[in-house]
Amino acid sequence: MIFLKESVYYQQVRYQLGRQKEMQPNQQTMLPEEHPLINLAPSIMVMPGTASHVFLDDHESSQKLLQVVRAGQFPYLFAVMSDPRVKESPDKFYKIGVIAEVLADIKDPVITLMGLFRAEMLHLKRIGGQGWGLWLTKVKKVEDENHDEYFIQANQHVMADMIRIRDLLVGFMIRARGEYKFDYRIMEAVVDEFENTDWGNKDAIDNYLWMTLSSIPDLLQNDKQPFLESTSLPERIELCIKKLKERLKLLEIQKQNISKDNRPTRRFRRVPVQDAKDQETDPDEFINGVHDDIKKRWEKFKVIRDFMNEDACDVVMEDLGKLKSFGSPQENTYEWSKYMRRVDFILGLPWKEETVQEGDITKVAQILDEDHYGLVHEKDSICDQVAPRLLNPNSKGSIICLVGPPGTGKTSLAKSMAKALNRKYIRMSLGGIRDEAQIRGHGITYIGAEPGEILKLMKRCGVKNPLFVIDEIDKLGHMSTSGDPSAAMLEVLDPEQNNSFKDHWVACGFDLSKVLFIATANQEDTIHPPALKDRMDVIRLHGYLEVEKVEIAKRHLIPRLMQDLGLAQNSVEVVWEEKLISKIIRGYTHEAGVRNIERTLAKILKKICRGYLKSKSEEKPVTKFEVTEQKVHEYLGPPKFVKDRARPTMIGEAIGLAWTPVGGDILYVQVEFYERIDGKKVLDLTGMQGDVMKESDKLALTRLRNILRETNPELADKLKNNAIHLHIPEGAVPKDGPSAGITILSALYSEVTGKLVKRNLAMTGEIDNKARVLPVGGIREKIVAAEGAGIEEIIMPKDNERNLHDVPKSVKDKLRFHFVETIDEVLTIAFPSRS
């Protein structure tokens, strides 16, 4: 038997990970067929990714091993432990061990081993004489199960568990320092290595686990072997956490024994786990002789611990134990403050408090109607989403995501839902968040560490079932050096995961399953990652029509402003000239929502506030003010936006329809032929056209050439012999998208034939290379803009006919629609005289 003694140096720890990175990917396949077996004593640990100095005794077999290693015959050894239950048999060796490299700096009687990877012993044979011979074995590398899917779905859990391991190591050092004798430097180096580890790499995580195990003092054979035999990385993570918790509990018992016996212990004494449970202090005796602050927290903990989960109870007990060991705040001010804050925070979370939810769906719909004008389809969709939660409050409902332009009422709809459902309202804006810790918190060991905003807001609201608005989710940052906030938000919003949301600072799970989450976004396509969007039911809010904006101003904005500015309290009456609000909306605002309308109306009412105060100071108070168009010009200046009605088109010109973030608009496509110069390009494009629109220009020209070649060769030659300048006015405004395809084709056809496009006709639709007309988006906004510009007829794709149900009947009744499937149909409608 070879008895070994271990000594791992602090300088080796930094070397270990670097040595692993230096290994070539195929190095393990180049190893010798057989390896000498080195039998480790129960106290020895050689693990993958760790370097160890081992001392060989004076036994002949030990010296023979040292001799062959020094001669360079075997650069790698198979390090394995014995099963103490089996004696004097080859079967006494465990089947799983570690292939270790013998490093060059051999000093008699020292062998320095660098653990490379786990291996399984296949065939064992003995060479040499009786009593001193060597064991040789063939081995097979132990492969882990495939956990790619695990990492994709639960990367945030892995990170949280590794932070937990790091925090347990720090806790162990704090509580053991000065009491027990072991090499703290090793554990400190492992903690420092945390910041240099790539947590998205499974091998890096595994290496950190092996280093962690190497740093824990006095682990015995039955502690280490399960780690080597496990083929599941998640299982090894759990084993590591479990083992550290056991060591911390044993450490606390040892400290209690020391204080009772009043004698120091030079070495960290091992106590079996079962003995630790038997020696656990009676909870009611815990507060004997402790500081009054700890007693207060203990009493509060006893009241609510039945509502807390097991992890939370463990963290509170652990932190209270640390506080007790500190003695008083004066002895360890920083550590005392840190752990006392965490105890207070956990005890302050709403573990049992919740509001009684309103169960009347009719009342919910009524409140939504009272608070918001229009949005009929949107409010109907919200009621559909809320109804299942009213039937079953414990159901895992999907997350509602309200998507729409700024000022369309997304946040105010959420407030109305909170009022209708009798839930508390809290809001968190994600705009610009790039650090995962802002959502999930920092580990408590960091200086200045704080819990994440999610649990901060939950603690502030005081109930576990609020309505929680996640604002601007489309502006959430992605993967960076500070983590991946979108992955953290995925755990918050996923009904399958949020029943145990883990904040790094709190270090325990908290149930968010009863929270009603409402997300808001301006654009749906910028919500990342796709898995996050997949967990939400999107309700799209379109921009308001002018008539809806007028009603919102009269019913909601003006009364609220009158109250906020103090006019209503002073009985001041404001009379608005007929149709003036509509003129203000058209001339001074340009938006899909009502935010600028409110701002503009506030400017007018502030002038009235000033006029009222002036009249009051002159002791001639005026309580009635009339707002006229002349007064508006005086208060606001000339109109900023002039929306002209569609003008008659000229030859080579057609009217298209466009969608913008603030609604719809009409646009003119203008074509002019000029003499073609050899070597110059055929098609000149101006008006800040985007790449997609430029492709539509080329496609329209190709289709027109084919049409004329078949129907009018003379015009085909004219098109061939001329260069084309295609311009879209308002050149400073970027334009893009495929929906102008039929408009461009019509303008080109008008120029080459010399015919005018039909009067007061607008069109929208994409074309393909087979002369088909394809559907486009933004139909509601485009139709409303066309009606407002005085358009009488609209050409649009046949497949967009279904989108008309979103358009108000009052608008549809003023227009005539032509639904087309081919380019030929477009030209027949746009040019009635076409033969």
Image (cartoon, rainbow, N blue to C red):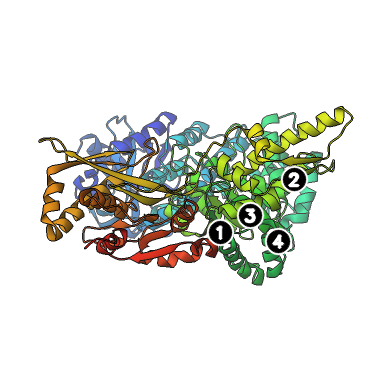
Under tag 1, what secondary structure?
A: strand
Q: Identify which residue, 41 or 747, lies in the foreground.
A: 747
Where is residue 507 drawn, in percent x and y?
59, 47
The crowd level at tag 2 (other Cα within 10 Å; few <14, some 14-19, many 20+) is few
The crowd level at tag 3 (other Cα within 10 Å; few <14, some 14-19, many 20+) is many
Structural distance between the alpha carbons of marks 4 and 2: 28 Å
Q: Which residue is mark 3?
A: 414
Structural distance between the alpha carbons of marks 4 and 1: 18 Å
Disc number for residue 575: 2
Q: How many marks?
A: 4
Q: Which residue is mark 4?
A: 367
Q: Quadrant of residue 391?
A: bottom right
Examine the rendered structure and indicate whether residue 44 appears above or below residue 796. Answer: above
Q: Are marks 3 and 4 in contact (CB under 8 Å)?
A: no
Structural distance between the alpha carbons of marks 1 and 3: 10 Å
The answer to whether residue 127 is seen in the rendering is: no
Under tag 4, what secondary structure?
A: helix
Q: Earlier in the sequence, mark 2 or mark 3?
A: 3
Q: Earlier in the sequence, mark 2 or mark 1?
A: 1
Structural distance between the alpha carbons of marks 2 and 1: 40 Å
Q: Residue at 28% across / 64% down in the picture?
A: 825
